Amino acid sequence: MPLLVTYVEAFVLAVWCILCLSSLSLIFTITVLSAVLVRYTLRQGSNRLPIAS
């Protein structure tokens, strides 16, 4: 959904909502950090994700 909103803002409305951009950047950051964590875990040879305690 955030990607659809960003698309509409960029190509239909030609305006940007700061709340939508901040939400998109937060989702992007979480996705990248999750991918890094999964890659790190798989390189360690473990099938389980580390759990913070």
Image (spheres, rainbow, N blue to C red):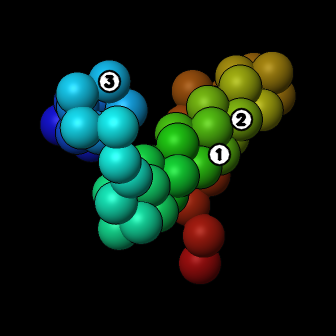
Location of residue 47 in the rendering, given as x and y in whole percent from the top left corner: 57, 27
| Image: 6 above or below 43 | below
Q: CA distance from mark 3 to mark 2?
A: 31 Å
Amino acid type shown at disc 2: Val
Viewer-closest of 28 and 47 = 28
Residue at 35% in and 68% down: 19
Q: Secondary structure at mark 3?
A: helix
Residue position marked by numbered label 1 in the rendering: 33
Residue at 61% in and 31% down: 35
> Which label lies toward us, 3 or 2?
3
| Image: 46 above or below 52 | above
| Quadrant location, the N terminus | top left
Residue position marked by numbered label 3 in the rendering: 11
Q: Quadrant of residue 8?
A: top left
Query: Of label 1 and label 3, which has the lower sequence position?
Result: 3
Amino acid type shown at disc 3: Phe
**Dot 1 alpha-carbon crowd within 10 angstroms: few under 14, some 14 to 19, many 20 or more:** few
Q: CA distance from mark 1 to mark 3?
A: 28 Å
Residue at 42% in and 66% down: 18
Location of residue 23 in the rendering, given as x and y in whole percent from the top left corner: 39, 59
Residue position marked by numbered label 2 in the rendering: 36
Residue at 35% in and 48% down: 15
In the visual, does 52 lie left or right of 3? right
- Residues at badges 2 and 1 in contact (C-beta under 8 Å)? yes
Viewer-closest of 41 and 21 = 21
Instruction: Inspect this view and state whether residue 12 appears.
Output: yes
The residue sitting at the bottom extreme is 53
| Image: 31 above or below 18 | above
Location of residue 16 in the rendering, given as x and y in whole percent from the top left corner: 39, 52
Location of residue 37 in the rendering, given as x and y in whole percent from the top left corner: 68, 40
- Residues at badges 3 and 2 in contact (C-beta under 8 Å)? no
Q: How many callouts does the rendering have?
A: 3
